[in-house]
Amino acid sequence: MQFAVKRINYKVIFILLFSVIISLFLSIQNVDAAVAKIGLINLAEVLNSHPYSEQINQLNATLREELQKRQGELNKQGKGLDES
């Protein structure tokens, strides 16, 4: 019985040590490089090279400006969410 308990304890210790080693190894890796690239493709480069990227960014900026303007008007009327 004691032999089985010792064996289980050794397995638990081994699993914990192995988990710590794996987590240390993963924390050392460059996370930014892993996020920026998917496989061999640089995702940011692909998205920025699309012909409509500039138009999409302009529309996004225009929409944000209009939403801020509308929110300001609603706040003045007391109907909006005051997010200051």
Image (cartoon, rainbow, N blue to C red):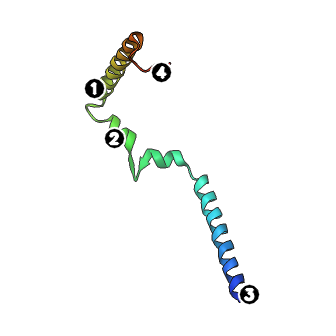
Mark 2 to mark 4 CA distance (whole Å): 35 Å
Q: Which residue is mark 4?
A: 83
Q: Residues within 10 Å of mark 2 (few under 14, many from 20)?
A: few
Q: Earlier in the sequence, mark 2 or mark 3?
A: 3
Q: Position of residue 37 (x, y in %)?
A: 43, 47
Mark 1 to mark 4 CA distance (whole Å): 28 Å
At x 40% / y 53%, what residue is drawn?
39
Name the disc covering residue 46, or none: 2
Q: Which residue is mark 1?
A: 55
Mark 3 to mark 4 CA distance (whole Å): 64 Å
At x 38% / y 16%, what residue is drawn?
79
Amino acid found under the numbered disc labelled 4: Glu
Choose mark 2 or mark 4, whichever is in front.
4
Is 14 on the left or on the right of 70, as rendered?
right
At x 74% / y 87%, what residue is drawn?
2
Q: Residues within 10 Å of mark 3 (few under 14, many from 20)?
A: few
Q: State whether residue 80 is above or below residue 23.
A: above
Q: Which residue is mark 3?
A: 2
Amino acid found under the numbered disc labelled 3: Gln
Amino acid found under the numbered disc labelled 2: Val
Q: Nearer the viewer, residue 48 or 83?
A: 83
Q: Position of residue 57 (x, y in %)?
A: 33, 27
